[in-house]
Amino acid sequence: MTQEKEFPIVNLISMPENPLKTIYAACRTCYSADYPINIWENATDNEKMLKLVKRVLASGHHSTIEHCQYVFTISGVSRACTHQLVRHRHMSFSQKSQRYVTEKGLFEYITPNTIKKAGFEAEYDEFMNKTAEFYEKMINQGIPAEDARFVLPNAATSSLVASLNLREFIHLANIRLCTNAQHEIRIMVKKMCDLAIEKDSWLAEYLVPKCEALGHCDEIRGCGRKPQKI
Ligand SMILES: Cc1cc2nc3c(=O)[nH]c(=O)nc-3n(C[C@H](O)[C@H](O)[C@H](O)COP(=O)(O)OP(=O)(O)OC[C@H]3O[C@@H](n4cnc5c(N)ncnc54)[C@H](O)[C@@H]3O)c2cc1C
C-alpha cells in the first residue's frame, strides 16, 4: 500500500474557547488583588491581553500557559513516528492497540520517499505483503494478536488521540520542527501547529523551531536557517 497524499491525518478536536483570555486571567491573577473571575469577566481588550501575555512569556513565567489544553486525533502515521511522539512525558495518549485490534489482510503502512526514490518500493511492498501473510497465518493458527504483532514493522500505521498543554506544545514545536527531527514527525507536528495557529494567529510566534526562539542554531549540524552558536 502506498502512502496517501494527506498522511498524516491530523485534526484538532478540542481546545479552550479563548486561550489568550485564559492565559491573561492566569497571569493577572498572580499580580492582582482582584478575584480571578472578575479579571476574566472584565477582560475584553485583545491587544492589552496579548501585550501582557507576551511580556509574561518572555519573563519565563511559563506555568501560566499550562491551562490551555489541545486535543488532536492523529492517523496514518507509522509506529516509528508514534514511538517518538510518546516520548513526550507531558503529553497524554490513547493509541490503537495491536493487542486488541487484529489486522485483517494487508495492514496500512508508510513508505518513506527515500525508499521510493531509490527504487525499492516494489521490494518493500513485497516484504509488507509477506509479513501480512505470515501474521494472518499465525492469527489463523490461534496465536494471539498480542504475540503475532511481533512481526509487524515500524512502518505499520497507528492512530491516536493525543493531548497536550500549550507549554508542552511550544516545546514539541521547538524540537520537532527542527530540520534535524525525523521527517514524518516534523510533518505531523507542523500540521498540529498550523491547526492551532489557524484558530489563534498570535501562536505563530511561539509554535516555531527552536532556532527561531533562540535566535541561533544549537545543533551540531545546522541547516543554515539560523547561524550556529560557536
Ligand atoms: C532530533 C532528535 C533525536 C533524538 N534521538 C534520540 C535517540 O537517539 N535516542 C533516544 O532515546 N531519544 C532520542 N530522542 C528523544 C529525546 O531524547 C527526548 O526523549 C524526546 O525528544 C522528548 O523530549 P523532552 O524530554 O525534552 O520532552 P518532554 O518529555 O516533552 O518534556 C518536556 C520538558 O520537561 C522537562 N522534563 C520532563 N521530564 C523530566 C524529568 N524527568 N526530569 C527533569 N525534567 C523533565 C524537560 O525540561 C523537558 O525538556 C531524540 C529527539 C530528537 C528531537
Image: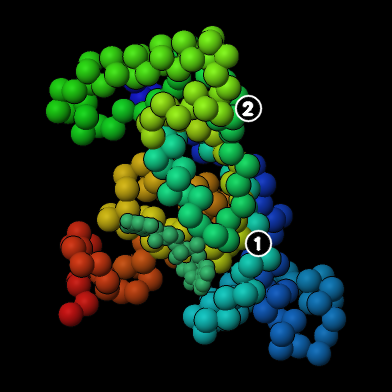
Q: Secondary structure at mark 2?
A: loop
Q: Position of residue 177 (x, y in %)?
A: 37, 55
Residue 131: which numbered mark, if any? none
Query: Residue at the location (52% across, 84% down)?
Result: 59
* Image height of 147 relative to 18, above or below: above
Report whether 180 appears left or right of 148.
Answer: left
Q: Residue at x 35, y 14 (%)?
A: 129
The image's colouring method is: rainbow
Amino acid of disc 2: Tyr
Q: Quadrant of the C terminus?
A: bottom left
**Alpha carbons under labels 2 and 1: distance apart:** 32 Å
Residue 207 in sight in this render: no
103 and 196: which is toward the camera:
103
Mark 2 sits on what residue? 100
Q: Residue furthest left?
A: 118
Point 57% across, 14% down: residue: 142
Front residue of 210 and 200: 210
Q: Neighbour class for label 1 at 10 Å: few (<14), some, many (≥20)?
A: some
Labels 2 and 1: the sequence-earlier one: 1
Query: Going by the image, does 129 lie left or right of 216?
Result: right
For mark 1, what is the residue? Answer: 68
Q: Is residue 2 left or right of residue 44?
A: left
